[in-house]
Image (tube, rainbow, N blue to C red):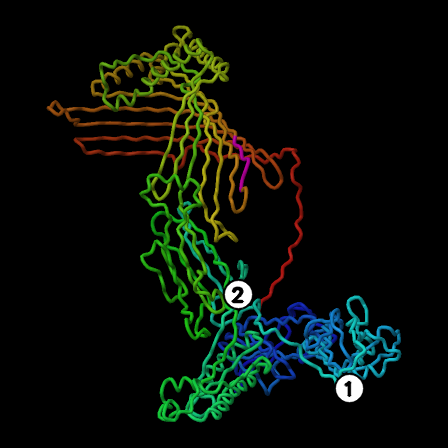
Amino acid sequence: MVKGVKKIKWSGVGIVKSNLSTPNKKVVIAPDQHVFFEVEKWYDATTEADKKKTLTWIFQDQKAKTIVLQKTLPSNNQYGIKLPKNLCGPFEYYLEASLSGKRDTINKTGLLISGYCTPKIVSSKWSTTNDGKDVRKEHLFKYGETVHLNLKTEGLNGNLNLSVDVFRKSEESKTPLYRYTSVDVIDGEINLAIKNTFVWFGKLKGIKETEEFYVKVFDPAHKLYISNAKNETGHARFLKINKKIVSQETKPPTNLSPLKTGEPDKNAARFEPCKFETITIIEDKKEDGKTTKINALVFDNGKKLVNKTPKKEPLKKTILFEFEKYDITPEAKTILNNTLQFLLEHQFSSIKIDGHACVIGKEQYNQKLSQQRSDAVKKAFVDGGLEASRIISIGRGEVNPTDDKQGRDNLKYRDEKEYKQNRSVVIAFDYYGHDAQTIIYETIAPSKDKNITIDITEYQNKACFREKGKHKKNIKINSTEYPKAIDQVTSKLDFPIRSNLAWWNNAPIQYIWPKVLANEYDIHIHSCRYFANESNPTIKAMVYSDIKWNLQLSYNWEHPFAYTHGNLPEYSRKNPKDPKVAEIIRDKRKAQSKAVGAGKEAKRVANSPEMLTKFELKLEGKWGGQSFELSGEFAKKIRTVLNVFIKYKEMADKVKNTLGGIPKGVTLSKTPFMFEIQSPSLNANIDWYLEKGTGINAAKVATVGKLNFKADPLIGAEFTLDLLGLVSKMNPVVAAFVGSLEGVLSAANGGIKLEAKFTGSLNFDFNAIEFNSLTGIVKGGSLDLGAKLQIKIEMTIHASIKSESYAKEPILELHAAGKLDAYFAAKIKMDSDEKGIYYQPEVGFSGMIFTFEIEIVIRGHKVVRKFSNENEPFLKPEPYQGEKHYLPLNNKKDVASAPSTGSGGGW
């Protein structure tokens, strides 16, 4: 049963002249735009599997039965026809789609195609040869010479009934000097060889020494002269003829075909069956504990390639013949058919066929035999649809000719390998293999191997046309990191990459700008359709280090702006404490040093209006679990904060004096306390590193930089109150209990601390700018102004019982710590969005967070228990975030974007 395509149709894409078209038979299309066609019906015997196979679209000359162009495409692809204006006219092409790859000579499954545009004469010239150089300005013809007229046209292709009227320049007569009828337009051109100019001589009255002539082209169907772009009907001005006769012979004019260049089309769309269609590189991206896949489509059917440089390659195919025969063998038919299909899909202008014979037999006989072999191949090509004018067939006779019957011209050698190879036909033509600039793929990798994947779709090489060096459907990767190249026949491959920065490098300063010193991986993927040149890599993967750099600049004061304390107990250095006990009282001992520092600073200020500050610079690089650091600290004195310092000092002294001056009997009068006004801590951070691009930039890496200014705090204060001292003042019973407890713990080599800390601070965080070298500024100008009020109550108890042995090892150790923490935070966030600059208030309460930890050690065996509600604090509300309030600073208006338009379609 018959199966395959029963009928094709216009897909609806492209401009069709419906008033000139005939339904289901002929489609007339507009010029210079693609009109697409698709399958309308299949024969009933066609299976669903058949319908998914490739189709061969055959665009042919309806009259000559020659194939103009043939393309093999997936069956779900539409096929596009685009006719230039010079090929528009009454000439009819025929388009069909074939499942078998052969034309259907019985059923009319296709459509007639022609183009329509306004008929016009585009250009003209007079030449001495067919389609030769325009000689109007420098050459004088003579009467009786053959003159060649060339007119390039639009909308007239295939017209066989035009008339060319010759006019004399000096006459304004509407009657032509001579009319040539039945003039053909072939491939959009009129090429008329005029061989009877002697007749013109006899029609001229008052002939001049040099006459000038021009022509008009008459359309008898519409009874009008055809004009040019300027609406002029006179063309080919002027042919000059000298008053001399070289021949009185007159012959009828000849319609000639345009000469062709002999060059294949460099820019034709490529559809070789030895191919690949897309290349994707896949990498893992780990972020926030999650792994996602990044797919970078680095190649997509030849789109957006840079510097396409087609390389002309001479191709040859050889077939062999039996002794003394010119019949094509079954083996040769297979080669010829493959070659024919290749030639039909590539518009080469000329194909050379050379026939050969071995030396056995008469040289004259073998000359004829070689021509017969060459002509047999030409006939096979013409029968297959190739235009005969594209083929040059030559019989070359014997290879190394001789008639020496005692020598090489002897029948006994007929089966020798050399003799068999000489009975051949060589088919030669030029082919533009595809080549383009190597695709650059950029990525980031650690110092140790990281696998990435390359995935190729529709990678096929069964129909590779090369006789030597056939494409292998392989992926080959070269790198100095590999002991030998990776080379596998596959369409998907995992392969390792790493950066050039070794994990053991202790001085990576040369990577201070990360996009340097890349490891290079040359990836070779080649086919006839794309990247045919195997000497150039298809993709070069540039692998950069994942190092991240941070430059920190901090500006701080050597001492607090102000500090004071009162009623703190004295601690003797001569009576060292257990380390855990020393840890308990560290804040009180630190209080002494702070007080000394603050006192020295106060004395220094009294003598000189300067204050000691610190400037610290630190450069840090991190990569692959390693780090590198350069840092330095510098001290200097400044005057500008002197007044502020003095005011804060007065504030601290007032607190001390106030607490110290409370009348006796009041609880707080002798309570131990510490009060500190913290100096500003100013920091600037610059981070820079490489980051994989996304979306259309997935094959590139971006240099990302972040600049941040921070003051934490801008100013702050901390008041610490000894609660044991406070409660002891409140009640004699409590005081006795506290005293007893401290006595017991002291006997047990221990101690206790219970204090409350009240802190307040103002801070700001200014994310000044974040930039990305691929996309520009990503974010800029975010400013957070915040305030924080916090209360923290801490209790720590430590005790240990030691043996009286020589080692005095502890028998029992107890360490317990409890903490209650809560804070209020308020923040004003300033940022911008598409509407403009805004500020937004935020308020939050941490809730009440309890933490209790106990550690018991019995003869070296430790037990630790911890209890906390950190994850679910008591009384914690949802944070409040206010509305955005926009500043009236030329905020952006809402602008409706215009709808985008797109164009699509494919073969």
Q: Mark 2 sits on what residue?
A: 310
Q: Dividing the picture into quarters, in which one does residue 417 lie?
A: bottom left
Where residue 853 sits in the image (x, y, percent)? Answer: 30, 31
Q: Amino acid at mark 2?
A: Pro
Gap between marks 1 and 2, in whole Å? 52 Å
Badge nearest the viewer, 1 or 2: 1
- For residue 248, the mark is 1
Q: Dividing the picture into quarters, in which one does residue 875 lie?
A: top left
User: Which image quarter is the C terminus in?
Assistant: bottom right
Q: Is any part of residue 159 visible from this angle?
A: no
Q: Amino acid at mark 1?
A: Gln
Residue in front for this viewpoint, 186 or 16: 186
Number of numbered discs: 2
Residue in front for this viewpoint, 343 or 144: 144
Where residue 423 sits in the image (x, y, percent)? Answer: 43, 87
The first of marks 1 and 2 along the sequence is: 1
214 above or below 418? above
Instruction: Name the side, left or right, on which 519 lies relative to 196.
Output: left
Q: Which residues are magenta?
A: 778-784
Where residue 773 sits in the image (x, y, percent)? Answer: 51, 44
For label 2, the crowd category at 10 Å Cα-Cα, with few meaning under 14, some 14 to 19 and many 20 or more, is some
